[in-house]
Image (spheres, grey):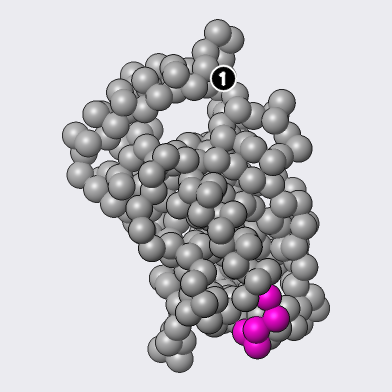
Amino acid sequence: MKYFLSFCLIFSALGINAQEVEGYEPNRGEYYIAKFKPGKDMSDMMKYVDTWSKWAKKSSVFEDYRANIHVPYFHDQHLMHDLVWYGRAPNAEAHFAILDEWVNNGQKIAAQLPVDVSQVIEVWQRDVSRPEGSVDGASYVIFQDCKLNEGVTSQQVYDAYFKFAEAAKKLGDNLGRKMMWPISGHGEWDYDFVVVMYANSLKEYGKNNQLYWDKVNGIEEQKALAEVGYECSNRRTYSSTQIFGY
């Protein structure tokens, strides 16, 4: 029952209709959580990325696919995984066309992976804000698990979060934000959605974090967001490298 209710919540949150005039279209994401095979390290992974990219570029289904490698930084499970392969597709049709190509034609390239994958998570996600500028080097990503208060919907949080992000941007904020709803592969979970924040670099995140405390915290849109009714915990962070599609 809990999973059924959570699934319904996802689509009530993502059911965009004509009355909704603000925000971004939902998209799909995938997270491959992995640990290096004995004797392998990140240099082996990046060599594999080059090989995989050449393979992927031969098929048009990867045209709108974007991929990053996340490496845990401020995290309580460093020993559990070494990296996360994050992929993004614009919609379910595009995502499953990619999976079809991978499952049916990617056996040889999959066998070359220098990591063992312990978990694969499928998600719906919806951008709240996107940073301007380009990524030069490692970017920075933050995840938090969030629970809704009784009677509050994800759509209400999204609407308030979007208005907050727009107001913060006018004060100089340049963080990316999104809300994410796991669909498959997550196992048991006791939260309603995941909030993701990201910056073009670690330095850029520090700048925006300071801006939040100096100028953004306390604005009306921030107060309105805080009053919607939800709580977030289990904050963990990653450095991230763009590897495909950018």
Residue 114 on the magenta segment: no
Q: Is residue 45 left or right of residue 234?
A: left
Crowding at dot 1, Cα within 10 Å, few <14 / some 14-19 / many 20+, comes out as some
Residue 40: give x, y in percent of width and height: 52, 13
Residue 163 visible? The answer is: yes
Q: Is residue 229 left or right of residue 199?
A: right
- Residue range in magenta is 217-221
- Front residue of 199/127: it is 199
Instruction: Please report the residue visible at 65 percent of the width from the left and 84 percent of the height from the top.
Output: 219
Q: Quadrant of the N terminus?
A: bottom right
- Front residue of 78/2: it is 78
- Front residue of 183/66: it is 66
Look at label 1 and name its amino acid.
Phe
Instruction: Please report the residue visible at 57 percent of the width from the left and 35 percent of the height from the top.
Output: 71
Snapshot quadrant of residue 113: top left
As drawn, the residue found furthest toward the front would be 214
Magenta: main secondary structure: loop
Residue 173: give x, y in percent of width and height: 51, 69
Q: Considering only vertical position in the picture, is 114 above or below 169?
A: above
